[in-house]
Image: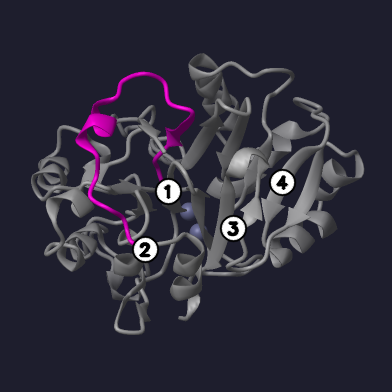
Amino acid sequence: MRTGLAVLALIGAPLAAPDPAQAQDATPCDYELVVLGAGQDAGAPQIGHADDTGPRLLPSSLALIDRSEGKRYLFDASPAITEQLAMLDGIEPPREGLGVDGVFLTHAHIGHYLGLAYFGREAAGASGVPVFAMPRMIEFLAANGPWSQLVELENISLDALNDRTPRMLPGGLAVTPFAVPHRDEFSETVGLVIHHPDVGSALYLPDIDYWPEEGESNLLLSLLSRVDHVFIDATFWDDNELPGRDMSEIPHPRVTDTMDLLADLPAEARARVHFIHYNHTNPIRDPASAESAEVEARGFSVARRGDRFCL
Ligand SMILES: [Zn+2]
Ligand SMILES: [Zn+2]
């Protein structure tokens, strides 16, 4: 993997120590991230698990509210987009229409893009919602129904991103994709770095097969040294999670291993790690579980639907 260094070059110098006064600021910020969902693609309860009484999960998705420009962006379009957008409307109402000024997609697995369908004729009948994705993903959407119909009817407007190349948005925001190892049947898979040079940065990386080494370091460590908030793959807790199945062949870094990898970082850095995209079997799904308490005790946090962060 050679992705990280170039991405890091784009988002500037290592972080300075945090300003405690800023961290305490409770007034609405100009740039706010909202966690719209924190589950794996299938959410929870999963199909076929009617007896599952655990906490409900919607598939992972983030929103970014840019109050200075009056814009709202989505990161992934999950099958629960109707409910997720309604939640966002409750926090920051749309200026007009749907009020979605751009959707950035990570990849073509069901939790991450099926929600695009709701921009179409049978639902919102939206007009020209910009959809930003990598070139293979764009080709997949343009060439296959029902997505191709959204393009033909101009409900959405496709805009190709390039690996490690920032996409500038109005007001100084930029979003930079970088390719990561994952099961790429229909599209590339990317992490997305959201960055404003005067404000801050965040990483959305819901799916990755493993943390690749990069030069002297590791991709995650490199990213964490320069990004304010990282929302990262927490699909599985550990290798004992799927009883009766040999998990050694199942990808995704385990939450326990990721915490071990980051254990020696200062508390301030660990506090910027937010675990997201957890499977219905992952015990951190339950805020009251021993595993959720362990994550907190080790200085990390579990992203929960409704969480809000100033960029
Ligand atoms: Zn996923
Ligand atoms: Zn995936």
Mark 1: C-beta under 8 Å from nearest atom of ligand 1? no
The label nearer to you, 4 versus 1, is 1
Instruction: Return the residue at label 3.
Output: 107
Do labels 2 and 1 touch, CB within 8 Å? no
Q: Which mark is residue 202?
A: 1
Relative to 35, 80 lies left or right: right
Q: CA distance from mark 4 to mark 2?
A: 25 Å
Amino acid carrying mark 1 in the image: Ala
Mark 3: C-beta under 8 Å from nearest atom of ligand 2? yes
Q: Could you tell me which secondary element the residue under label 3 belongs to?
A: loop
For the question of whether residue 203 can be seen, the reply is yes
Residue 212 to residue 19: above or below: below
Q: Which mark is residue 223?
A: 2
Do labels 3 and 4 touch, CB within 8 Å? no
Which of the pair 248/126 is nearer the observer? Answer: 126
Residue 269 position in % (x across, y down): 22, 53
Q: Could you tell me which secondary element the residue under label 4 belongs to?
A: strand
The label nearer to you, 1 versus 3, is 1
Of the residues under marks 3 and 2, which one precedes in the sequence? Answer: 3
Q: CA distance from mark 3 to mark 2?
A: 20 Å
Amino acid carrying mark 2 in the image: Leu
Amino acid carrying mark 3 in the image: His
Residue 70 position in % (x across, y down): 63, 25
Relative to 148, 162 lies left or right: left
Q: Which mark is residue 131?
A: 4
Which portion, as a residue range, is magenta?
A: 14-40
Residue 202 to residue 161: above or below: above
Of the residues under marks 4 and 1, which one precedes in the sequence? Answer: 4
Q: Could you tell me which secondary element the residue under label 1 belongs to?
A: strand
Residue 131 position in % (x across, y down): 71, 46
The label nearer to you, 4 versus 2, is 2
Q: CA distance from mark 3 to mark 4?
A: 12 Å
